[in-house]
Image: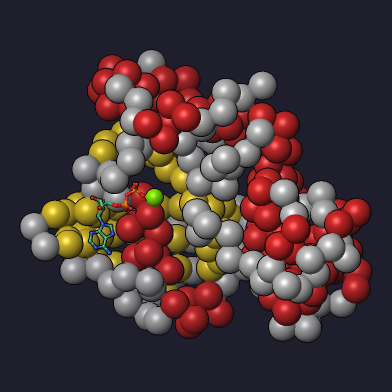
Amino acid sequence: MPFLELKSLVRTFGGLRAVDDFSLDLSEGSLNALVGPNGCGKSTLFNLITGNLRPDSGTVRFQGRDITGLPPYRIARRGIGRKFQVPAIFDELTVRENLVVAGRRRGDDAEISRILTQTRLSAAHQDPAGELAHGQKQWLEIGILLAQRPSLILLDEPTAGMTPAETEATVDLILEINERQNITILVIEHNMGFIEHLACPLHVMSKGKRLKSGDFASIRGDEDVHELYFGRREPAAAEAQPYA
Ligand code: ADP
Ligand code: MG
């Protein structure tokens, strides 16, 4: 039984098929990346998984149960955490307070400290979250997800706007969460250096459909993908920081 099973998902906006017959199975504890040009439907697909949008047709099954169309809070409660492109943190609270609130005060000090260490925020734990550097805010949001103890994490462009050093640290962080805590991760990313270092299966999306899946080398060598993604880079990819 797949941990997460997406079956023939369709979501239209007016005449546009933003997600078009998209199917994908993720196994428990796996790390996968979703790539594709701007506007190909990646974030919409995440919205279908998290209940922020309902599919026109198709199903989402998580741990064997149909969660299609459930409200977001119920899907979150079942253990699916999601990081949006823009960090959702409380600027006025300290870094530590953000984690305590996210864990609904269940987390003990040891758990909070572990998350602070893991997200490289120990030294900043008493700072107001609003004063963090851009990259640190992204890590705090990952920490907020961890405090909610999810079993599946969806990350939407977690390295957007990061420096090469921050991007490198984020690779380590994601691998660590996946390997040590056995949390299943699906990550949307534009930065090809980042994707290469994750060394995980890639799924290429084009016009709402799953075009190809494979490892980094096979995807990079694929002509259709080259044409779609590597050949004609959209502005967001061109602006991305080169990976050191
Ligand atoms: P990606 O994340 O791959 O860049 P999106 O999933 O955000 O792409 O968008 C896919 C397509 O659906 C785009 O053409 C976008 O404009 C459209 N779209 C996304 N959300 C909405 C919405 N709420 N209403 C109308 N169109 C939308
Ligand atoms: Mg998007």
Picture residue at 52% right of the left edge, 57% below the top:
86
- Farthest residue toward the left? 15
The location of residue 235, given as percent across then percent down, is: 37, 31
Placement of the N terminus among the 4 image quadrants: bottom left
* 165 left or right, relative to 214: right
> Can residue 179 be seen?
no
Residue 134 higher or lower than 61, as above or below = above
Picture residue at 47% right of the left edge, 29% below the top:
239
* 117 left or right, relative to 16: right
Picture residue at 38% right of the left edge, 71% below the top:
52
* 150 left or right, relative to 53: right
The location of residue 106, given as percent across then percent down, is: 78, 83
Picture residue at 51% right of the left edge, 31% below the top:
240
The location of residue 17, given as percent across then percent down, is: 16, 54
Q: What colouring method underlies this structural image?
A: secondary structure
Placement of the C terminus among the 4 image quadrants: top right
Q: Quadrant of residue 143?
A: bottom right
Residue 152 higher or lower than 138, as above or below = below
The location of residue 21, given as percent across then percent down, is: 20, 53
Q: Nearer the viewer, residue 112 or 198?
A: 112
Residue 35 higher or lower than 242, as above or below = below
Question: Tag count in the figure?
Answer: 0
> Can residue 158 be seen?
yes
Q: Quadrant of residue 93?
A: bottom right
Q: Nearer the viewer, residue 5 or 227?
A: 227
* 173 left or right, relative to 230: right
